[in-house]
Amino acid sequence: KQEVTQIPAALSVPEGENLVLNCSFTDSAIYNLQWFRQDPGKGLTSLLLIQSSQREQTSGRLNASLDKSSGRSTLYIAASQPGDSATYLCAVILPSNDYKLSFGAGTTVTVRA
Amino acid sequence: KAGVTQTPRYLIKTRGQQVTLSCSPISGHRSVSWYQQTPGQGLQFLFEYFSETQRNKGNFPGRFSGRQFSNSRSEMNVSTLELGDSALYLCASSLTGNNEQFFGPGTRLTVL
C-alpha cells in the first residue's frame, strides 16, 4: 500500500522567505506526482505535475523536484507572499493502482505579512 | 475553457436519506474520479470512471455508488446516509486517468 507523508504538518514564515515543502512516498514505482494547493473549504488547485521520467518542474515562483530512488519530492516556493497561505498537498499515482491519487495529509502554510 | 463544475455546492440531509451529487468534467476529459475529504481521514478515493465504465474503486461500503454518462458527466449517490458521511465530496477530471488531475470546487454534505 502506498504511503504518502508530508512533513511538517504546519509551517509559519515571514513574507519574503522561501518555502520548502517535503513529500515522501514508500513505493518508488510511481507513475507521476502532483502538487496541489487547497484554500479553506475549497477544492484543490493543481500546481505542478511531475512525470516519473522527470526530475523537476517549474512554474513561476514554484519549483518541484522528484527523486524516485529516495521516494521524495520537494516543492519550493520563492519569495513567499501572504497569498501563498494555504494547505499544500502532494499526491502520487501508481501503475499498479491506476487512476487513483494517493494523497499526503498536507502541509498548512501561513505567510505572515 | 471551463473548469470542473459540481452541483450542488451545499447539501443538508438527515440520517437515512439518500443524496445524488453531480460532476461535469472539463471538455474533452473522459476520466472522472470522486474523493471524500474529512478532517479525520483526509482525502480518500471513492471511484473512477472512464467511458461510462468504473475502472477503480476505493474501500467504501456499497451505499456509495456512481455512474458516468456518455457525455462524461458523472454522478455519485449515497444511500441511507449516516452522520459519518458528512464531508466535502470532490470530483476530478483528466484526459485519460493517469494525466494531470483537475478538481472541482466540491459539494459540502452535512448529515444531521
Image: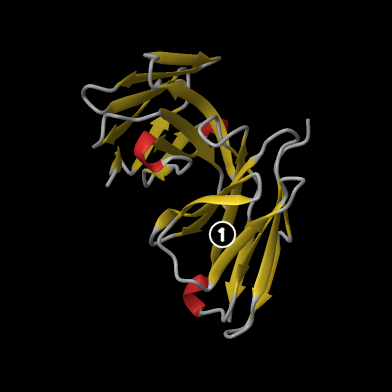
Q: Position of residue A95 (x, y in %)?
A: 38, 34
**What residue is rendered at 40% in x and 29% in y?**
A31
Left or right of A94, for residue A67 = left
Does the image show residue A94?
no
Residue B11 falls in image quadrant: bottom right
**What residue is rendered at 50% in x and 78% in y?**
B83
**What residue is rendered at 52% in x and 37% in y?**
A37
Residue B96 falls in image quadrant: top right
Nearer-the-camera pick, B77 or A33: B77
What chain does mark 1 sit on?
B
Amino acid type of the residue tagged 1 in the rendering: Leu
Q: Point out the residue furthest to the left here.
A: A70
Nearer-the-camera pick, A94 or B42: A94
Q: Position of residue B35 (x, y in %)?
A: 52, 53
Crowd around label 1: few <14 · some 14–19 · many ≥20 (10 Å)? many
Q: Secondary structure at mark 1?
A: strand
Q: Is residue B46 above or below residue B103?
A: below
Nearer-the-camera pick, B61 or A85: B61
Left or right of B5, for residue B35 = left
Q: Position of residue A62 (x, y in %)?
A: 49, 19
Q: Which residue is mark 1?
A: B88
